[in-house]
């Protein structure tokens, strides 16, 4: 399993995205959380099918707070289909548009 998470911004809106490839042989769940500089969070729940094809999971796009220069962060947690066993946690922090790495 591979994943990479980033914070994106465009047109006065910010959101988080996780790129993934699930080669585990079983479907997984992901919870993607965008942490805003004002302390609020935005979450997305995604089903991740088994297979070698890459995919993405995104949070809803919301108005950027702090003028786009404030620090945002994103974390994706991938778990088994029942959500009982965490298999991977990957995060990014930095300016919008900067990607995190596999963890």
Image (tube, rainbow, N blue to C red):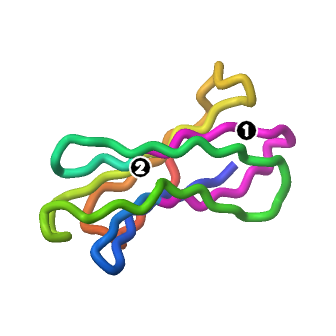
In the picture, measured across the screen, residue 81 lies left or right of residue 10, that is: right
Task: Please state which of the two labelled residues, at mark 1 or mark 2, is closer to the viewer.
Answer: 1
Picture layout, residue 67 above or below residue 89: below
Q: Residue at x 59, y 56 (%)?
A: 57
Question: Where does residue 80 sit, x and y in percent of width and height?
Answer: 71, 29
SS state under label 1: strand
Residue 100 in view here:
no
Quadrant of the rendered image containing residue 29: top right
Q: Which residue is mark 1?
A: 28
Give the magenta part as a residue range. Answer: 17-33
Q: Residue at x 65, y 25 (%)?
A: 83
Q: Magenta segment: does it hold 70?
A: no
In the picture, measured across the screen, residue 50 lies left or right of residue 33, that is: right
Q: Residues within 10 Å of mark 1 (few under 14, many from 20)?
A: many
- Observer-nearest of 53 and 37: 37
Question: Where does residue 12 sit, x and y in percent of width and height?
Answer: 28, 74
* Of the image marks 1 and 2, the number of the one nearer the N terminus: 1
């Amino acid at each position: 399993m591979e994943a990479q998470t980033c914070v994106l911004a465009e047109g006065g809106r910010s959101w988080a995205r996780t790129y993934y490839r699930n080669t585990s042989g079983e479907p997984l769940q992901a919870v993607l959380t965008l942490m805003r500089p004002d302390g609020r969070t935005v979450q997305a729940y995604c089903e991740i099918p088994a297979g070698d094809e890459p995919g993405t999971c995104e949070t809803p796009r919301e108005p950027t707070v702090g003028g786009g220069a404030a620090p945002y962060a994103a974390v994706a947690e991938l778990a088994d289909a029942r959500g009982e066993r965490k298999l991977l946690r990957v995060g990014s922090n930095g300016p919008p548009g900067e990607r995190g790495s596999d963890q």
